[in-house]
DNA sequence: AACTCGTGGGG
DNA sequence: TCCCCAAGAGT
């Protein structure tokens, strides 16, 4: 790791901000510095690319223009607005945060990063982003871009997968961030990280700060940042039951904790829970699902195998393979069933994860 | 500290 | 197909 003297720091600040003034992106959430706007955009941008976020941000702001609107909205409406964006606890935590602000903070945002982290869903990165952009506090906002950019500029070889590494980057960046334009500086680092200093195919030869980029000058840019890799997703097999009760579809709401919390899907049964042999046949699967419906839901299902290839859906830690089974449920009470029967029109109003959309597309289309 | 939590894009 | 990555936070 190398260190910069005061003159180099000043030179870097001036060069970066001059570039940002000319080439910084015009994004919907950059039209003002309203903390609400900064906050919503930062939450959406967590682990999510800018191009994905833009239409969601536009729709979200039209639906929930103020913190009070967000706090008062039914959760189902929030999840519907978030549908397809992933990491759904983000929007549920945003509503908790909105209520927290109204009740505990008299609707007034705290102005410092240190106090912003007391709010639900706001961690060290988001606190730094809001504090610097909305309130002009000279604090770093250490995200993936900051790790990548500064690890290359200064050849920092600490493993960014380790939690303790954050403190090192915060210390380093704190000495470099300009006190007059901290928000612009942090956003400039992000723009730099998504343009010239990308992860896979950087273009540092044309970067405005290439003369500060020690890794590039040494020809080993791609060695940074150092990051230990994660385990591959664990395979899990499911049966999806596309069951109708007269002209209604059976839909279940997932538990309020864990994956896809509170979202709606057709009944998804881990095949491991169906007492089956190693080499079961389609007919065995159908029979096991009928038994499962009887035992778990007290529902009489007449099922049939849907002879199309399974849906596969890969999450960060799990790879689902989902075989479809169709069926008709006898009219009966749904007291033991964690869901409801809905028409096709009603179904489309429910917040559903992408994997559910794939299941419908595979098994309901001709 | 290590694990959980989605989705889309690119090589 | 598989891998990694993308403006992370909660537990």
Image (cartoon, coloured by chain):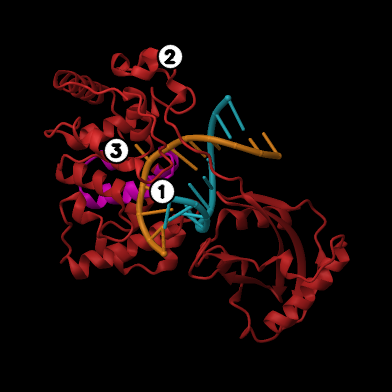
Chain colours: A red, B cyan, C orange
Residue A220: % across, % down:
44, 18
Q: Is residue A30 magenta?
A: yes
- Mark 3 or 1: in front is 3
Q: Is residue A244 visible?
A: yes
Q: Is residue A148 above or below residue A329?
A: above
Q: Residue at x 31, y 62 (%)?
A: A70
N-term-proximal mark, 1 vs 2: 1
Q: Which mark is residue A56?
A: 1
What's the magenta bit mostly, secondary-structure-wise? helix
Dot 1: what SS?
A: helix
Quadrant position of residue A179: top left
A344 or B2: nearer the viewer: B2
Q: Which mark is residue A117?
A: none
Question: Which residue carries the number 2 mark?
Answer: A219
Q: Is residue A324 magenta?
A: no
Q: Residue at x 88, y 62 (%)?
A: A281
The mark tally for this picture is 3
A33 or A136: nearer the viewer: A136
A244 or A163: nearer the viewer: A163
Question: Which residue carries the number 3 mark?
Answer: A168
Does the CB distance between marks 3 and 1 fall below 8 Å? no
Q: Please report, as a chain letter, where disc 3 is located.
A: A
């Amino acid at each position: 790791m190398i260190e910069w003297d005061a003159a180099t720091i000043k030179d870097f600040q001036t060069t970066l901000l001059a570039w940002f003034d000319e080439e910084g992106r015009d994004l919907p959430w950059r039209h003002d510095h309203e903390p609400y706007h900064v906050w919503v955009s930062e939450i959406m941008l967590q682990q999510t690319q800018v191009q994905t976020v833009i239409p969601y941000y536009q729709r979200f702001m039209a639906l929930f223009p103020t913190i009070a609107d967000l706090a008062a909205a039914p959760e189902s409406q929030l999840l519907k607005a978030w549908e397809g964006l992933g990491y759904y606890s983000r929007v549920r935590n945003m509503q908790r945060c909105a209520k927290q602000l109204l009740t505990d903070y008299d609707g007034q945002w705290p102005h410092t990063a240190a106090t912003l982290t007391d709010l639900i869903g706001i961690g060290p990165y988001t606190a730094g982003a809001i504090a610097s952009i909305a309130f002009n506090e000279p604090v770093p906002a250490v995200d993936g871009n900051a790790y990548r950019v500064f690890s290359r500029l200064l050849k920092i070889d600490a493993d960014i997968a380790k939690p303790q590494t954050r403190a090192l980057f915060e210390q380093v960046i704190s000495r470099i961030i300009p006190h007059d334009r901290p928000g612009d500086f942090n956003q400039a680092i992000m723009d730099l990280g998504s343009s010239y200093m990308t992860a896979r195919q950087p273009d540092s030869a044309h970067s405005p700060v290439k003369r500060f980029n020690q890794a590039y000058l040494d020809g080993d840019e791609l060695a940074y940042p150092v990051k230990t890799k994660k385990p591959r997703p664990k395979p899990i097999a499911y049966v999806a039951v596309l069951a109708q009760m007269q002209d209604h579809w059976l839909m279940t709401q997932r538990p309020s904790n864990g994956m896809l919390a509170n979202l709606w899907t057709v009944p998804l049964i881990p095949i491991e829970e169906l007492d089956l042999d190693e080499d079961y046949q389609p007919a065995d699967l159908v029979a096991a699902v009928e038994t499962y419906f009887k035992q778990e839901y007290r529902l009489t299902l007449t099922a049939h195998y849907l002879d199309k290839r399974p849906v596969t859906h890969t999450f960060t830690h799990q790879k689902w393979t989902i075989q479809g089974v169709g069926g008709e449920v006898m009219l009966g009470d749904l007291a033991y069933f964690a869901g409801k029967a809905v028409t096709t029109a009603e179904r489309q109003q429910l917040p559903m994860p992408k994997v559910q959309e794939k299941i419908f597309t595979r098994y309901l289309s001709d």
